[in-house]
Amino acid sequence: MYQTESWGSYMPARTSLGDPLERIGRLASENAVVIFSISSCCMCHAIKRLFCGMGVNPTVYELDEDPRGKEMEKALMRLLGSSSAVPVVFIGGKLVGAMDRVMASHINGNDFTYSSKLKKAGEEEWRTF
């Protein structure tokens, strides 16, 4: 288990009935940067480190620690059209993508795309206080 301070905030996904995609959308919109992860996944760890290295404190939902995590994982696979559901990044409630998309943008120097999304998401989050 990791220390919560190292990733920003760890939020146990609240248990509620309903459609897993609706739940994902609600959780993704509650914080500026949200990562859906599995605690033992090395790619999830890499994404969390990447965002923390950019000075971002993402909210992380560890699906393997949630009673309905498997349902959410399947819903994320459908959403992405992929056989791998995690890690998945949302910024400002909007789907950014999975590991391949985030890393490709980072490697190609397209962090400005995320920087502007992060800035906008952060400003919107601060306005709610």
Image (cartoon, rainbow, N blue to C red):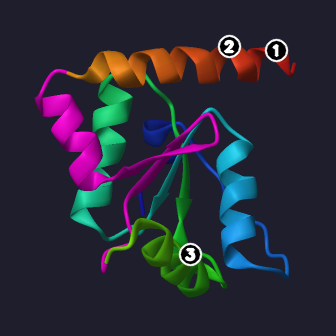
Q: Position of residue 120 (x, y in %)?
A: 60, 17
Q: Amino acid at mark 2?
A: Glu
Mark 1 or mark 3: name the one nearer the start of the chain.
3
Cα distance, mark 1 to mark 3? 31 Å
**Looking at the rendering, in which quadrant would you find the C terminus?**
top right
Cα distance, mark 3 to mark 2? 30 Å
Residue 70 is drawn in which quadrant?
Answer: bottom right
Q: Nearer the viewer, residue 123 or 67?
A: 123
The residue shown at (43%, 76%) is 77
For the residue labelled by badge 1, is the local secondary structure a helix, a strand or a loop?
helix
**Residue that carries the numbered disc 3 in the rendered image:** 65
The residue shown at (12%, 31%) is 107
Q: With respect to residue 123, does 44 lie above or below? A: below
**Residue that carries the numbered disc 1 in the rendered image:** 127
Could you classify mark 2 by the number of other residues whose Cα lies within 10 Å: few (under 14), some (14-19), or many (20 or more)? few
Q: Position of residue 1 (x, y in %)?
A: 42, 63
Q: Position of residue 36 (x, y in %)?
A: 49, 59
Q: Nearer the viewer, residue 82 or 17?
A: 82
Does residue 75 appear to the left or right of 52 in the view shown?
right
Q: Position of residue 34 (x, y in %)?
A: 55, 45
Mark 1 touches mark 2? (CB < 8 Å): yes
Residue 43 is drawn in which quadrant?
Answer: bottom left
Does residue 35 appear to the left or right of 46 in the view shown?
right
Q: Which residues are magenta?
A: 83-109
Could you classify mark 1 by the number of other residues whose Cα lies within 10 Å: few (under 14), some (14-19), or many (20 or more)? few
* Residue 12 visible to an observer of this rendering: no
Mark 1 touches mark 3? (CB < 8 Å): no
**Residue that carries the numbered disc 2 in the rendered image:** 123
Q: Nearer the viewer, mark 1 or mark 3?
A: 1
Could you classify mark 3 by the number of other residues whose Cα lies within 10 Å: few (under 14), some (14-19), or many (20 or more)? some
For the residue labelled by badge 2, is the local secondary structure a helix, a strand or a loop?
helix
